[in-house]
Amino acid sequence: DGGITQSPKYLFRKEGQNVTLSCEQNLNHDAMYWYRQDPGQGLRLIYYSQIVNDFQKGDIAEGYSVSREKKESFPLTVTSAQKNPTAFYLCASSILFVGTDTQYFGPGTRLTVL
Amino acid sequence: DQQVKQNSPSLSVQEGRISILNCDYTNSMFDYFLWYKKYPAEGPTFLISISSIKDKNEDGRFTVFLNKSAKHLSLHIVPSQPGDSAVYFCAAQIKAAGNKLTFGGGTRVLVKP
């Protein structure tokens, strides 16, 4: 079954701890993205990557870090520098420069900082 | 500065009637627009899109209209069904700048049986 998986679905973190959210895709997509959704708000872009070993900051990258060592994987680390990390995190992927370049989303990870 | 806005946070409609969702944008460089549907605790799913060279795109019960001069697009759902109850996000893209999407804040639609 092709798709995007995110794990875990729910994650609790103590204040001051770093935490890594997993995102894997088997769609052979070139580009991957991380978004954050807060209650009653739209999705905001954190980081994106169009090719392995390369990534760019989105609109709200402060306090986050990513890596893209494999085409299939784009983990997001929420560091202790992120002031308000409690949110719903969504990973997406897309083919680049082909057709509509529609982004396909994973099921999300809800992070709660205690 | 919010470049994509959905000014109606919620919409309630009777089953079988039309749902009209609106979206305004400020960046005239946007040349591709998408609508996504999202259920609680799930990722958004792609619904329909439109290029800036068109003013209408239709897919079954879903039609998107684009008015470039007004920087406005709308999504029509006809007829509305209870399963359409979800949050709908409008998103915009500048194709030459890569695949980054800028999302609106979403409109929650409730279709009453």
Image (cartoon, coloured by chain):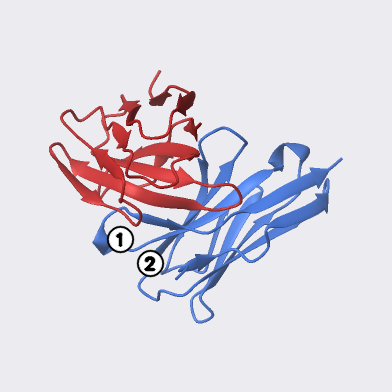
Chain colours: A red, B blue
Q: Report if the CB atoms under discs 2 and 1 are less than 8 Å apart.
A: yes
Mark 2, residue position: B31
Q: Is residue B82 above or below residue B19?
A: above
Q: Residue at x 68, y 63 (%)?
A: B8
Residue B84 placement, left or right of B46:
right
- In percent of width and height, residue A7 lies at 41, 22
Q: Residue at x 54, y 80 (%)?
A: B70
Q: Does residue A7 appear anywhere in the picture?
A: yes
Q: Is residue A112 above or below residue A103?
A: above
Q: Quadrant of the N terminus of chain B?
A: bottom left
Q: Amino acid at mark 2?
A: Asp
Q: Chain of mark 1?
A: B
Mark 1, residue position: B95
Q: Residue furthest bottom?
A: B69
Residue A12 placement, left or right of A65:
right
Give the SS element for disc 1: helix
Q: Chain of mark 2?
A: B
Answer with mark 2 or mark 1, whichever residue precedes in sequence. Answer: 2
Q: Residue furthest front?
A: A16
Residue sitting nearer the eye, A30 or A17: A17
